[in-house]
Amino acid sequence: DAKTTQPPSMDCAEGRAANLPCNHSTISGNEYVYWYRQIHSQGPQYIIHGLKNNETNEMASLIITEDRKSSTLILPHATLRDTAVYYCIVRVDGSQGNLIFGKGTKLSVKP
Amino acid sequence: DSGVTQTPKHLITATGQRVTLRCSPRSGDLSVYWYQQSLDQGLQFLIQYYNGEERAKGNILERFSAQQFPDLHSELNLSSLELGDSALYFCASSASGGHPRSNQPQHFGDGTRLSIL
């Protein structure tokens, strides 16, 4: 599975959009991009995933560049409850077993 | 609420002891995954079961074992416990788990916090 690079931390003002970047320059054609977040010591929460098209759900939007070497998770209106560690993971379609979690980005939403 | 239930939430025991952690997957999910999260190692995959059979193995110690029962719940058994086994243990489930072109996400429970004294 391809490795990902994320900034260790980011700040965002409450009510503003939070844009979290992820680089995955070695991604291959059958690897999906997944985003999870972990609030304090709770279990990781699935947010969204995609292959090459942009995706949107009730939680966030995922923008994947045309060359698929990077992506951005967008939380459109961040709240204090969005403060968490956000993990970008690339995973082979249909692969078994593990999600490989890196260190993620610690997002702090401030009033 | 992810729909994945883990019990107990907290467990305190001593070195050398054995414990069992329990996981009930989301309704309809056939795959169960176990992960360990310690302060210095981050989230590490341990093992996966799919419909009762072991499907993938990660960095699981020989002192640890798991199984998935016919009703699809899973148990993680940790024996000869050491101080370094203190960690959060998470269970996740997904609808898929090895079939081609199955990219169903994993959904995590809230974990069991294991403290070894």
Image: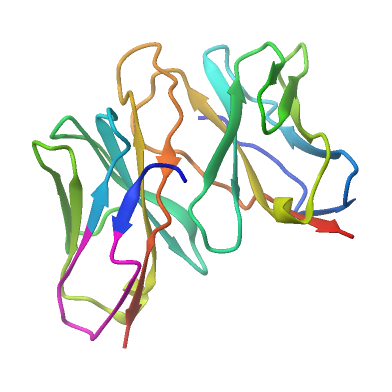
Residue A42 position within the rendered picture, expressed as x and y whole percent measured from the top left: 51, 58
Q: Residue at x 89, y 45 (%)?
A: A15
Q: Out of B6 and B83, give the one closest to the viewer.
A: B6
Q: Out of A90 and A11, give the one closest to the viewer.
A: A11
Residue B19 belongs to magenta span:
yes
Q: Which quadrant: the C terminus of chain B?
A: bottom left
Residue that extends furthest to the left in the rendered view of this protein: B70
Q: For this view, does B103 lie left or right of residue A17?
A: left
Q: Residue at x 31, y 42 (%)?
A: B33
Q: Which residue is drawn at 18% across and 53% down?
A: B75
Residue A2 position within the rendered picture, expressed as x and y whole percent measured from the top left: 57, 30
Q: In this view, does B108 lie above or below B42?
A: above
Residue A108 belongs to magenta span:
no
User: What colour scheme has been applied to the protein in the rendered image?
Assistant: rainbow
Q: Magenta span covers which residues?
A: B7-21
Q: Out of B21 and B59, give the one closest to the viewer.
A: B21
